[in-house]
Image (cartoon, rainbow, N blue to C red):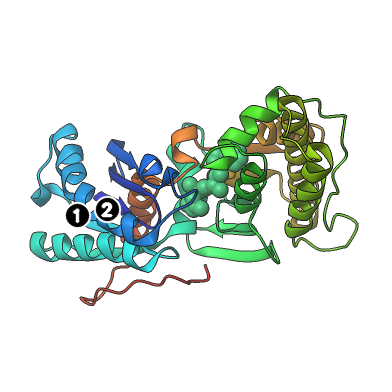
Amino acid sequence: MRVLGLESSCDETGVAIYDSERGLLADALYSQVALHADYGGVVPELASRDHVRKLLPLIREVLAKAQLQGSDLDGVAYTAGPGLAGALMVGACAGRAMAYGWGVPALAVHHMEGHLLAPMLEGNPPEFPFIALLVSGGHTQLVRVDGIGQYRMLGESLDDAAGEAFDKAAKMLNLGYPGGPQLALAAESGDVSRFTFPRPMVNRPGLDFSFSGLKTYTMNTVAECRGDGVLAETDRNDIAAAFQEAVVDTLTIKCLRALKQEQLKSLVIAGGVSANRALRTRLEQRLATISARVFYARQAFCTDNGAMIAYAGCQRLLAGQSEGLAVQVRPRWPM
Ligand code: KG4
Ligand code: ZN
């Protein structure tokens, strides 16, 4: 089975072709980061228009890379939600129309299912069942995964997502957009022991998260250090290091708790924040002490991409699922 995957839920246009026998055949990604940088965040209308501009050229590019034609495909998968309504519509309309034209099934994929399955694209993938920590700009969730489509939510953020917290803290530190990777970079030069930030909700039972308090704590620390002047670079780096340490520690504590609760030894981390090197290293160290393992995708497949949608669509097709003719998107969609 060969499936074309289209991702257009936010500010990346991703296209890929996955083959159930041969693996990933081709992928291409266009990031709109430069387009939104001046605004300090994603502007939905600009995002939709840029997806329109980029999607067809990228589809042509992956077909050429894989030396395939549309008629060689067995299905077209697209991200149907959650995400920005207009941006989702671009991928959904293109995906649905091409599937109709080529006479193959269309597959509406949940964006977070795509993220969750992205580590399956790597060599030596995890076996079911496992715990998945989904950490992106819009979600922070702990999920028990028993198979494709068999997901049980164990806990989630009651307010901001981890990636959103990274982005907001980065903004307070005058780091560029998108903030997560820039904050991580600043943290590398910071003194992690200078400030101790709170670890929200770790002393309460359960697997839910909360990151909004950490945001306020960051704001207050920035104000204290800055006084009436500008924030010094050392202060900025030290605050970044303390913030990252608090998020990494909190996520690690909850992951260990989830593995213990479900008596499992495999953890998958997925979504943009799973690209964070401090998080990966900490989880590797801590899981080794309980003979457990952490799995993650290569950096490019942690953030939004077409490969994860092609893979998830292919699994759904193999399981005999596909969509009716209507073009539907679900900007809000529980997994
Ligand atoms: O999965 P993703 O590309 O888009 C969503 O589905 O939201 O995740 C984007 C999020 C952003 O909040 C970004 O700042 C964060 O992932 N992110 C990171 C890193 N790389 C991306 N956060 C911390 N450290 C990173 N290295
Ligand atoms: Zn995403």
The residue closer to the viewer here, 289 or 158, is: 158
Residue displayed at 26% across by 57% down: 49
Cα separation, mark 2 vs mark 1, equals 24 Å
The answer as to whether callout 1 falls within 8 Å of ligand 2 is no
Q: How many marks?
A: 2
* Horizontal relation, residue 131 to residue 100: left or right: right
- Determine whether 91 is above or below 267 in the image: below
- Circle 2 residues within 10 Å: few <14, some 14–19, many ≥20: many
Residue 170 position within the rendered picture, expressed as x and y whole percent measured from the top left: 63, 42
* Horizontal relation, residue 70 to residue 30: left or right: left
**Amino acid at dot 2:** His
Q: Find disc 1 in the rendering and name its residue.
A: 74
- Determine whether 64 is above or below 209 in the image: above
Q: Find disc 2 in the rendering and name its residue.
A: 51
The answer as to whether callout 2 falls within 8 Å of ligand 2 is no
Residue displayed at 63% across by 59% down: 143
Q: Nearer the viewer, mark 2 or mark 1?
A: 2
Residue 252 position within the rendered picture, expressed as x and y whole percent measured from the top left: 76, 44
